[in-house]
């Protein structure tokens, strides 16, 4: 079992018990992809598997799970709300490379500078964030341009041991996911046209930023080539613009 498989298994089980899940199409060629990388004793097979579903309030729930053995272990798990809800995004980037672990978990806000939005979605989880920070301290510098896309409860950390990932990071992932599902359960649809347009533009800003700055781009390109990687990023991982164009 890979390092992050228990995280994905837990998430799927929680989704199945809390949400009215429906199928979400994964484009042809993106369900699973493998490549042989390296040479000689360093030769290794890298496998990337995709999962996707949706619900009445969440437009897309998806994961990309990369198993590169000792070379890399990655789980990117994101939930995107439908455009008529003001819910934040749920995002977990869990990365293990030979040099260490990089962990980012957050409920990424639509409106970072809105006091009322923070009161609704960030303040209720600040005590949870602070409890986890005791074991998962701040991971250091983060790009300034990215800061507007993360909440005050952004858990960004660089654990030094795999045991910490298996225990404290897993516990944080569970708590953030449970809290997010509580927000989803309580969410009411937005009907005001001006508010709906603001939500749409906020989602597009996030999608465009993440697609442009996706930290996995270099890794995936090395494994599978640029063409497949770009189509995967824009056609599956961050596919809102594609779907809006199809609906137009």
Image (cartoon, rainbow, N blue to C red):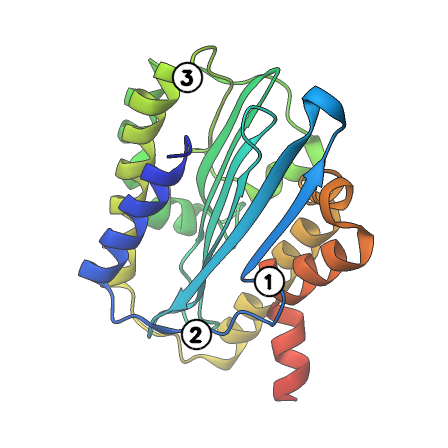
Q: Is residue 248 left or right of residue 57?
A: right
Which residue matches tag 2?
84
| View extreme (right): residue | 226
- Residue 35 percent location from the top left of the image: 67, 45
Per the image, label 2 sits on a secondary structure element best described as loop
Give the mark nearest the N terminus, 2 or 3. Answer: 2
The answer to whether residue 27 is above or below residue 144 is below
Which residue matches tag 1?
30
| Quarter of the image that includes the N terminus | top left
Mark 2 touches mark 1? (CB < 8 Å): no
**Residue at coordinates 25% horizontally, 45% vertically from top-left?**
178
The answer to whether residue 198 is above or below residue 145 is below
**Residue at coordinates 40% horizontally, 67% vertically from top-left?**
53
**Residue at coordinates 24% horizontally, 65% vertically from top-left?**
19
Which-is-in-front pick, marks 2 and 3? Answer: 3
**Residue at coordinates 69% horizontally, 40% vertically from top-left?**
36
Q: Is residue 242 left or right of residue 177?
A: right
Q: Is residue 180 left or right of residue 27?
A: left
Which residue matches tag 3?
162
């Amino acid at each position: 079992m890979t390092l992050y498989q228990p995280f994905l298994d837990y998430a799927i089980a929680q989704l199945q018990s809390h949400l009215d899940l429906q199928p979400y199409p994964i484009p042809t060629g993106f369900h699973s992809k493998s490549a042989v990388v390296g040479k000689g004793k360093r030769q290794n097979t890298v496998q990337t598997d995709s999962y996707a579903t949706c619900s009445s309030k969440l437009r897309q729930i998806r994961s990309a799970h990369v198993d590169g053995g000792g070379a890399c272990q990655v789980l990117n798990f994101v939930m995107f709300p439908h455009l008529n809800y003001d819910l934040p995004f749920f995002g977990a980037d869990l990365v293990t490379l030979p040099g260490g672990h990089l962990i980012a978990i957050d409920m990424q806000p639509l409106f970072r500078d809105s006091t009322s939005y923070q009161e609704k979605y960030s303040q209720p989880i600040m005590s949870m964030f602070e409890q986890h920070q005791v074991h998962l301290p701040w991971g250091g510098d983060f790009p300034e341009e990215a800061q507007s896309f993360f909440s005050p409860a952004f858990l960004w950390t660089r654990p030094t041991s795999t045991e910490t990932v298996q225990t404290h990071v897993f516990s944080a992932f569970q708590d953030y996911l449970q809290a997010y599902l509580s927000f989803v359960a309580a969410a009411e649809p937005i009907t005001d046209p001006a508010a709906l347009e603001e939500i749409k533009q906020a989602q597009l800003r996030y999608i465009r930023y993440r697609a442009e700055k996706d930290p996995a781009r270099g890794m995936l390109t090395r494994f599978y080539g640029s063409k497949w990687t770009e189509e995967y990023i824009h056609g599956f991982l961050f596919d809102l613009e594609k779907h809006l164009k199809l609906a137009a």
